[in-house]
Amino acid sequence: MEHVKMLITRDSGAEDIELPEYKSDGASGMDVRAALDAPLTLTPGQIVLVPTGLRVAVPVGYEVQVRPRSGLSLKHGITVVNTPGTIDADYRGPVGIILGNVSQVPFTINRGDRIAQLVIQQVVHADVQIVDNLDETARGEGGFGSSGIN
């Protein structure tokens, strides 16, 4: 498995928050934790920015994708609203996780709770070129469920 170096600093007051970590040898995502000063209850339909107390330096040529934790989504309806969120290689600001509650019941997040996962991915840039026409395909313009459910 390939490894890349991602540098991390903690914001003042977040020294007790555990660093992102892989919970198993085969995990692709590192769990990241909430650096809240007090418990935060998300009401149904509410969207909030949850601080992590971290700042990262991602190597050029990579990004960090912010993804929901499957257990939080399935059991509690808590998801990353802008899935996947992106942390670019040139961003040095605080890492915040945009969480939403899509369930029918409130959910409370406490300091140190694992709230999302971070996945490092390579980035490829496109060279955009304008053309008069695109090539034809069997699918053509069919989209948004045009191939059916079965």
Image (spheres, rainbow, N blue to C red):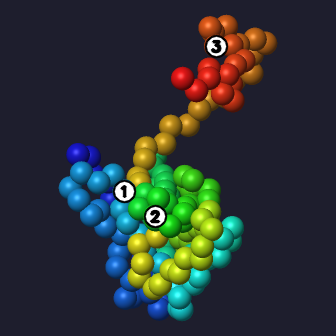
Give SS at disc 3.
Answer: loop
Is disc 2 surrounded by few (<14), some (14 to 19) or many (20+) residues within 10 Å?
A: few
Mark 2 or 3 closer to N-term?
Answer: 2
Can you see residue 96? yes
Residue 38 point in image, percent of width and height: 54, 92
Residue 59 point in image, percent of width and height: 42, 55
Mark 1 or 3 closer to N-term?
Answer: 1
Instruction: Please name the residue shown 41% across and 54% down the image.
Output: 119
Query: Residue tagged by mark 1?
Result: 29
* Marker disc for residue 83: none
Query: Residue tagged by mark 2?
Result: 75
Residue 36 point in image, percent of width and height: 52, 85
* Marker disc for residue 139: 3
In the picture, measured across the screen, residue 145 lies left or right of residue 116, that is right
Foreground mark, 2 or 1? 2
| Kind of residue at disc 3 | Arg
| Kind of residue at disc 1 | Gly
Is disc 1 surrounded by few (<14), some (14 to 19) or many (20+) residues within 10 Å?
A: many
Tags 2 and 1 touching, CB below 8 Å: no
**Disc 1/disc 3 C-alpha distance (Å):** 34 Å
Mark 2 or 1 closer to N-term?
Answer: 1
Q: Where 37 sits versus 77, above or below?
A: below
Give SS at disc 2.
Answer: helix
- Pick whichever, 140 or 121, lies toward us: 140
**Disc 2/disc 3 C-alpha distance (Å):** 37 Å
